Amino acid sequence: MATVQLSSARVGAAAFAAKGKASLEPLRLPATVTIGEARPARRAFRGLVVRAATVVAPKYTTLKPLADRVLVKIKSSEEKTTGGILLPTTAQSRPQGGEVVAVGEGRTIGDKKVDISIQVGAQVIYSKYAGTEVELNDYNHLVLKEDDVIGILETDDVKDMKPLNDRVLIKVAEAEDKTPGGLLLTETTKEKPSIGTVVAVGPGPLDEEGNRIPLSVSAGSTVLYSKYAGSEFKGADGTNYIVLRVSDLMAVLS
């Protein structure tokens, strides 16, 4: 219901105009008079509950992904730094890896049935903000499309990652420590490099008939890529790597 507010000054003036020189004493009002039902102008959010993950009821013990989706059991967040310092929950980085525990039946492209290329038990890396998080059997899982999986980890080191589809794994060139004039650069002033060496390439994207299209670059090529594309990782020895789609490559250097 709409709310109307009248100040005492305005009511008094109106009464004076209507009654001439009549006394305004009987018309004294509080500073503000509210006519009608007063309700705060705000929304009610009592029923809104925000969860980090969709909780699956205990009566359901399995989850079968459909089509080209996979179910990944999320790797636990690191609770300590490499130096042993405990991290608060807000400082723990969101994991980008886990174990595939179930896969869908694949998809149909044209007249061809294409199975999912990822096997159950594979350790994978996925796009940072992809998929839907669910809590199943007290563990956090992620349901995501196969194309959101960046690569398969052969070992615990990112340098051994096997990229999927149209993605490439690149070893990032080291940033320059000095300007052309010889001035030393700090870590914050070093320009982010956009040049690197291709370490591994994926099998290529699927065409309209479900066949793989080989990528135009190969391992060992030095490439120039879009500056803010891809997902960045750090190897066990501190080397920087980046995984991006081949469409983010701009040129091959020689």
Image (cartoon, rainbow, N blue to C red):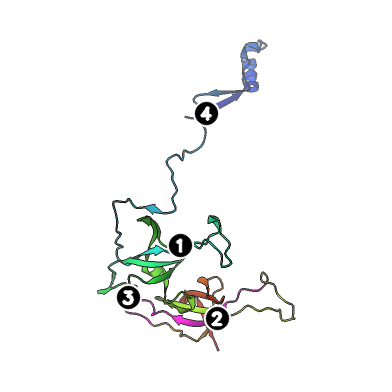
Q: Nearer the viewer, residue 118 or 115?
A: 118
The magenta region covers: 189-213
Marks 4 and 1 sit apart, C-alpha to C-alpha, by 53 Å
Query: Is 153 part of what is drawn in magenta?
Result: no
- The answer to whether the residues at label 2 and label 3 have Cβ atoms under 8 Å apart is no
**Which disc number belongs to residue 124?**
none
Q: Is residue 114 above or below residue 142?
A: below
Instruction: For label 3, count other residues whose C-alpha is less than 10 Å away and answer few (under 14), some (14-19) or many (20+).
Output: few
- The answer to whether the residues at label 4 and label 3 have Cβ atoms under 8 Å apart is no
Query: In the image, what residue type sits under mark 2?
Result: Gly
Query: In the image, what residue type sits under mark 3?
Result: Glu
Query: Is 194 part of what is drawn in magenta?
Result: yes
Marks 2 and 3 sit apart, C-alpha to C-alpha, by 31 Å
- Quadrant in the picture for residue 5: top right
Query: In the image, what residue type sits under mark 1?
Result: Ser
At 51% across and 37% down in the image, what residue appears?
42
**x, y (%) of residue 153?**
42, 74
Compare marks 1 and 2 and give the one earlier in the sequence: 1
Marks 3 and 1 sit apart, C-alpha to C-alpha, by 38 Å
Residue denoted by label 4:
3
Q: Is residue 45 above or below residue 91?
A: above
Residue denoted by label 3:
208
